[in-house]
Image (cartoon, helix red, strand yellow):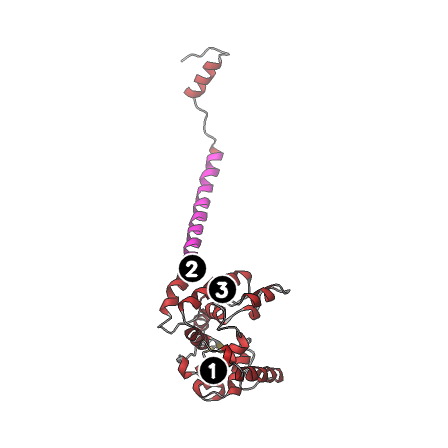
Amino acid sequence: MTFPAGDPAADSDRAAAFPATPNAESDAETEAAMPVARRRRRWLVLACKVALVIIALPLVLTPIYWIVPPVSTLMLWSGLTFQGMQRDWVSFDAIAPAMVNSVIMSEDGRFCEHAGVDWDQLNLVMATKGGPSRGASTIPMQTVKNLYLWQSRSYIRKGLEIPLAYYADFIWSKRRLIEIYLNIAQWGPGLFGVEAASERYFGRPARDLTTRQAALLAAALPNPIARNPAKPSRVMQGTARIIERRARQAGPYVDCL
């Protein structure tokens, strides 16, 4: 096939007839990049699946926990890491009223008023230097954190706690909420639930706790690894006295139970 020199049309035809030789180096780079892109897509898909599971599990498990005694992520982690996992589930009626009152008055005084989140307290604490803290968490928020989330503080965890707390408060009654909370709360290494804690520290079941003993158990909750209700420090004793006094005046704060 002959093409006249200098003819643009001929140059175009010549290019079509004899396509440029592929660049071997460029093709090699493209082929090398394809597996990387494929791996990235695979990891992205996996991450999305994991996120969906994390979101779906609480939605499915929360209604089930109306009937079934739940196990928290912290309890599972304690068992898997051989720290031990002692917990004896007891019903709400098998827990001394002083224990219920002490926990509500020390952890979440507006427990009966809010729908899972106390925004006044949350906004106050979030505005302070250092970010979110335990002081911003209601009992529903602490319950869903213990059940489904991790323990380290972060805005991400706090952001997940809020919708889960609303959901739990909507699904469960206030009575069931405090029952679950008191049965999954940690009171020492591998020690979970008020019944196991009461037996360990005071040698008696949770239904027989005195007001003073209940206040000491409540005072230990913010730092259960370091605080021993049976051997309280002077500071812990002072905190327990305040909780005990508030628990005796809890009447209007616990009328939802």
Percent coordinates x, y for residue 3 in the rendering: 44, 12
Magenta-drawn stretch contains 40: yes
Residue 20, compared with residue 189, is above or below; it is: above
The residue beneath circle 3 is: 161
Magenta segment main secondary structure: helix
* 26 or 166: nearer the viewer: 166
Question: Which mark, residue 55?
Answer: 2
Is residue 44 a member of the stretch shown in magenta? yes
Say which of 91 and 29 sits in front: 91
Residue 110: percent from left, percent from top: 52, 73
- Taking 203 as reference, is 34 above or below it? above
Q: Is residue 239 left or right of residue 166?
A: right
| Residue type at the position of mark 3 | Glu
Q: How many numbered marks have been drawn onto this rendered protein structure? A: 3
Q: Earlier in the sequence, mark 3 or mark 2?
A: 2
Q: CA distance from mark 3 to mark 2?
A: 12 Å
Asked whether residue 195 is in view, the answer is yes
* Quadrant, the N terminus: top left
Disc on the earlier residue, 2 or 1: 2
